[in-house]
Amino acid sequence: MRLTAYAAVLFAAVSLAGCDSMQIEDFEGKEPKLVLEEYFAGQTKAWGIFEDRFGNLKRQFTVDIEGTWDGETLTLVEDFVYADGEIDQRIWRLTKTGENSYEGTADDVTGVARGQIAGNAFTWNYDIDLQIGGRTWNVHFEDWMFLQDDGVLVNRAYVSKWGIRLGSATIFFQRIGEAAAGGSALLDRRAAE
């Protein structure tokens, strides 16, 4: 009986993993074009939530991000403030390794993060040590970021361990002053009509 239950869980995990059919190439030519080193240069603000695998809201947070691009490395200093008062900081160092590819490191990331960009989308995969229930778990993140009109960047991050999805994060990024400087794409389109 135990072997049958284990086989069923393994089959479900493999089946769910096979359902992810989105490919970065699907976004080639989509607008507005996302250029990471331009978007994250300067100050960015983010608002996010984390839901468990059942869709229950577990955490809410904001992030202040300071980004610098020196021509080779994009450094992102991320200062997190959680609704329960916890604070945290992560410093990413991303290097462009090709026309559409990136690698990155951070202190709590295991190994090297790898990402690809096309059109308005960026996908980013990495393993990270997270504190969950008083223990440290090494989990896998698969992030999908999509640049929208008015400088809003939407991030859906899927968190898994051993191929089983544990939860997901939804994060919205806005460059400081971007909305005021860029105006509204909807209003711009209406004015042009």
Image (tube, rainbow, N blue to C red):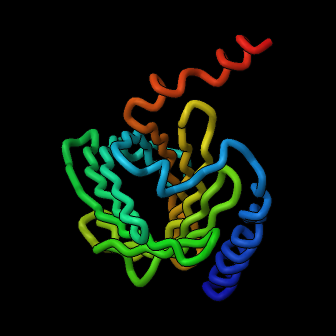
Q: Position of residue 68 (x, y in %)?
A: 34, 57
> Would residue 67 be visible to someone looking at this image?
yes
Q: Is residue 4 above or below residue 68?
A: below
Residue nearest the viewer, comparing 78 with 151: 151
> Residue at coordinates 60% horizontally, 76% vertically from top-left?
98
> Residue at coordinates 29% horizontally, 64% vertically from top-left?
91
Residue nearest the viewer, comparing 11 with 71: 71
Q: Quadrant of residue 2?
A: bottom right
Query: In the rendered image, which quarter contains the C terminus?
Result: top right
What residue occupies the far front of the structure in this picture?
Answer: 71
Residue nearest the viewer, comparing 123 with 31: 31
> Would residue 126 be visible to someone looking at this image?
no
> Residue at coordinates 33% horizontally, 41% vertically from top-left?
62
Q: Position of residue 121 (x, y in %)?
A: 65, 54
> Residue at coordinates 29% horizontally, 57% vertically from top-left?
77
Q: Position of residue 125 (x, y in %)?
A: 54, 71
Q: Is residue 23 left or right of residue 138?
A: right
Residue nearest the viewer, comparing 104 with 20: 104
Q: Quadrant of residue 31?
A: top right
Q: Position of residue 61 (x, y in %)?
A: 34, 42
